[in-house]
Structures are given as C-alpha cells and as structure tokens.
Image (spheres, rainbow, N blue to C red):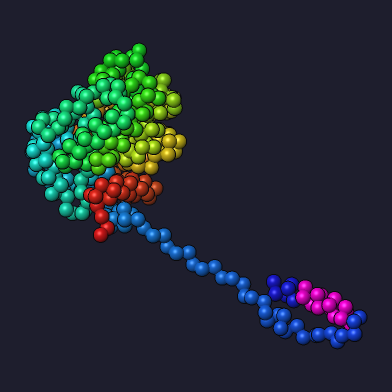
Amino acid sequence: MVRHVVRAMTLVAVLTCAAALAAGCAPETDLSAATTSIPPLPTSAPTPAPTLSCAETIVRRLPPAARAGQLIMVALDAHDDPAGLAPLIAQYGLGGVVLLGGWNGGMPVVQAATTQLQSGPEATGLGLLIAADQEGGQIQQLRGDGFSDMPSGLEQGMLDPATLQSSVRGWGGELVNAGVNLNLAPIADTVPDELGTANPPIGGYDRQFSGDPAIAAFHVAAFVQGMTQAGVATTLKHFPGLGRVTGNTDDTDDGTTDTETTMADLQPFEAGIRANAKLVMMSSAVYTQFDPANEAVFSPAVVTDLLRGRLGFDGVVISDDIGVAAAVSSTPVEQRATRFVAAGGDVALTADAAAVAPFHDSLVAAMGADPAFAEKVDAAVTRVVQLKVDLGLASCG
C-alpha cells in the first residue's frame, strides 16, 4: 500500500517540479518527509466478550439435573399435604407447582400451603412458580374467604375492557396475598357461537370471552394487563385454540383434531402477547392447517415456527397436562417432556407426580446424548429463570 502511495506522490512531485522549473524554481528531490507522514494502518481491537444477563449467569451455575428440574411443574391436589410434595421438589429441583383439585378453604389454607412450598427449594436458590387456574366461573381453583367469586369468561366478555382490567387487578391482588405468582389464565380460545356448549373444554363451561376473536382480543389484553398490574404473571391458553374441537383433550383423543383454525383465529393470542403475557400454554389437539402430523404441544411447526416465529412470542411456553391427558397417551410418558422441549417448549406440566421422574430422567439423558438438545434445554431454562427474576423469585444480588 505504501509503495503505491509513494509512486503516486512521486508523480505528483515530478509534475509539480516541472511546473516549478518553468517558473524558474529549483525542484525538491527529498521525499522522506512525505513517506514518513503516512499514518499507520489501523488495527482492530479485540471483540469484548458478551455480558451475561442475570438469568444466563444463574443458568450457568446449574448442573444438568437442576436445569431439567426447572422445566417441570407438578400438581398439588387440595386434599394433599404440601409437606408430602417437598421431597419430590428437592430431589428433582422442580421449577413449579400448580394447585389443582378445588382449594375451597379460603385464603389462610392457600397461604399456608404456598408458604410451605416456597420454604423448600433451597438447593437451587430459585423460588417456585406457584400457579392456579383462576379464570372465573366454573374454572376457579381458589375459593372461600379472601377470594372473590369471579364471573365466567362469557360474563367477563360483556364488560367494558377498562372495567374488566380494574376487576382483574383486584382478583390478582388476592392471588398475590395467597402466595400465587402465576395465573393459568386468560382463555384466548374462541368458540364459534354456532358450536357453543358442543365444544366440551371451553364452551361447555362458558370459559371463552366471545365467539368473535376480534372482540375476545380486547378482553384478553385487559385481563393480562390487570393481572400484570397486580404482580401476577399470566398464561394465554390453549394455543392455537381449543374453541373448535368436539372432544376434551384431558379425557379423550376423539374429536380433538381441528381442521378449521387459521391465523384469523389467533387474534386473542396476538393481543395477549402485545399486552405482555409472560406465558403461553400449548394445546394437545392436532391442527391440520398448521401441522396435521403432530399434537400442537409436540409440534415444532406450531411452537417454534408459528408461536415464536410468526407471532414473535419470546416468553415461556408451558404445556397443558402431559402427565395423564388422554390426547397424548400414544406418546410414551418418558418421551413427552423431551418431545415438548425439542419442539420449542419450556415447562412440562404434569397433573400426576408419577410422571416427574420419567420426565426428568429423559431430559437429563437427552442432554447428555445430544449437544443440540442440550442447547435447547439451556435456552428453555434461561427463559424460565428470566421469568423468575422478573417475579422476584431469583436474583444475582
């Protein structure tokens, strides 16, 4: 490079001197000053190592077994003693518990249970996600003194969104008082009016806000915003929608193939994502418009391509029950958690504690056998831990 510069400057000097001779001036022949004034070529500075987030820092400290545990949520029935679940949580480093079975004893009973649950997970230093199905109407797990009688989804859908948001903020405050940090609500499924109660999982219980996805979208967003203001994380369910099936995925695999749902039906999910819902729950039905070969919960096309890709959701993806649900019974229990995570999911939920060990052990084995799967686990655990950081259940301080 310097050689070319010197040649060019020499030519300029010759031409300049020629002009100078014509004017009676003596030419300059020393080019040393010109060559020594050329600045050195810039050198590129080394690229600094990326700064790890708090969640990433925590995940790096977790051994594989603890990482697998953070991806499992187990149920605690209202009739069971929380102390009986403590050894399972400790043994596998579980990430969360869902309260099922109808907790009708009021606020003190729930508070006692959640306090006992949160006192257990000391090995990982991470608090538990404690969840409840607190939708309203017939689907309200926590009842009694201290809990409002919430109207059904259809009744909530008749409220002005601003009024609904205010009411939800109050219901969310009750959950916070009870020690519940995650609501497995709102319902983002829409049931066509002509189907109504012939849709067993949603319409049969009046869980939907509306039969029109455009209208339901406003109420989904209002529900998410109200809970968020109260300090409770929300879950949009059941992606990409259970409003058009004629069977209940909990009880049967008959009538759980949806041939009609399209992108137009996803407006409530999109609205909830824009409103900052932290989780999305996957349906266990099959959707032929998106992936005719797999249940949505096990489908990369639905979880990764549709939900994360097209809709841009970057939060935590949780399964519906895949411990005992009939819709997933054709998949061996030891394959369910790994298939879910491989599809892009994060938290495998089981209503049966007996599924915890096969879920956990299969995740650990798959991590050791397949580096690509281990990377998926790391990404999933990081999303879960980030949620816990956001909820004050984990910190780097």
Q: Residue at x 40, y 33 (%)?
A: 270
Q: Is residue 10 magenta?
A: yes
Q: Quadrant of residue 171?
A: top left
Q: Position of residue 233 (x, y in %)?
A: 27, 40
* Quadrant into which the N terminus falls: bottom right
> Is 178 in front, or is 204?
178
The magenta segment: 8-21
Q: Position of residue 2 (x, y in %)?
A: 70, 74
Task: Tell me the chief SS of the magenta region.
Answer: helix
Q: Pinpoint residue 262: horizontal percent, then vertical percent.
A: 43, 25
| Residue 84, x across and y down, in percent | 9, 41
Image position of 372 (left or right of 175): right
In this rendering, is residue 74 above or below 324? Answer: below
Q: Is residue 319 left or right of residue 9?
A: left
Vertical arrangement, residue 202 with respect to residue 227, above or below: above
Please state if 4 lies on the left or on the right of 231 as rendered.
Answer: right
Q: Nearer the viewer, residue 395 or 176?
A: 176
Residue 366 on the magenta span: no
Q: Is residue 295 visible?
A: no
Which residue is pictured at 51% across the width and 68% down the height? Answer: 45
At x 29%, y 46%, the residue is 387
